[in-house]
Amino acid sequence: MQAFASAIETLDSTATDDYRPSDDEPFMNTRQIEYFRKKLMKWKDDILRESRETLTNLQTATENHPDVADRASSETDKAIELRARDRQRKLISKIDSALRRIEEGSYGYCEETGEPIGLARLDARPIATLSLEAQERHERRERVHRDD
């Protein structure tokens, strides 16, 4: 029954969420802000759900492998999974930061220049804090200093 309710909810959200931000409308209007807020919240919820599943799997997967190679493979798999979860934990922090910027009214604007971050960039990477140009400058500086 719960799976059915979840499927209905998914259908409802896709039927009403056909909206895509467009350059033809004012930048960061209420529809765009709500679109990105929902996108960030869904992303965060998905990560948290996957993390809970990982925790459950790690707790239940305490097999005792008699073969050393099987045990090593299992431990490697667990280590990879934990590293992925750690990256996602850091990602949740960035998502929370983006949600705070939405509340503060600064979401969608470059932290360096104050200029709008392109909608296509925000749609592809909703946690972006720099415009494409500012990000490229940042990466060039990083590359120069890394070569030193």
Image (cartoon, rainbow, N blue to C red):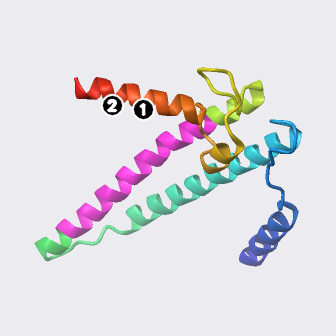
Against 134, residue 10 (above or below) is below
- Provide residue 60's location: percent of width, then percent of height: 40, 68
Specify the quadrant of the image occupied by residue 114: top right
Q: What is the magenta range? A: 72-96
Foreground residue among 33 and 143:
143
Number of numbered tags placed on the structure image: 2
Does dot 2 land on a helix, a strand or a loop? helix
Residue under numbered circle 2:
143
Foreground residue among 42 and 71:
42
- Provide residue 58's location: percent of width, then percent of height: 38, 62
Task: Identify which residue is drawn at 31% across, 67% down.
Answer: 62
Is residue 90 shown in magenta?
A: yes
User: Contact, CB < 8 Å: mark 1 with mark 2?
Assistant: yes
Task: Identify which residue is drawn at 63% across, 44% down.
Answer: 121
| Label 1: few (<14), some (14–19) or many (≥20) C-alpha neighbours in 10 Å | few
By secondary structure, the bulk of the magenta-drawn segment is best described as helix
- Provide residue 3's location: percent of width, then percent of height: 71, 76
Task: Identify which residue is drawn at 77% across, 78% down.
Answer: 4
Q: Which residue, as the protein is rendered here, is positioned at the far left?
A: 68
Foreground residue among 15 and 44:
15
Q: Quadrant of the C terminus?
A: top left
Foreground residue among 144 and 46:
144
Mark on residue 139?
Answer: 1
Specify the quadrant of the image occupied by residue 134: top right
Task: Identify which residue is drawn at 71% across, 31% down.
Answer: 116
Against 36, residue 10 (above or below) is below
Q: Quadrant of the N terminus?
A: bottom right
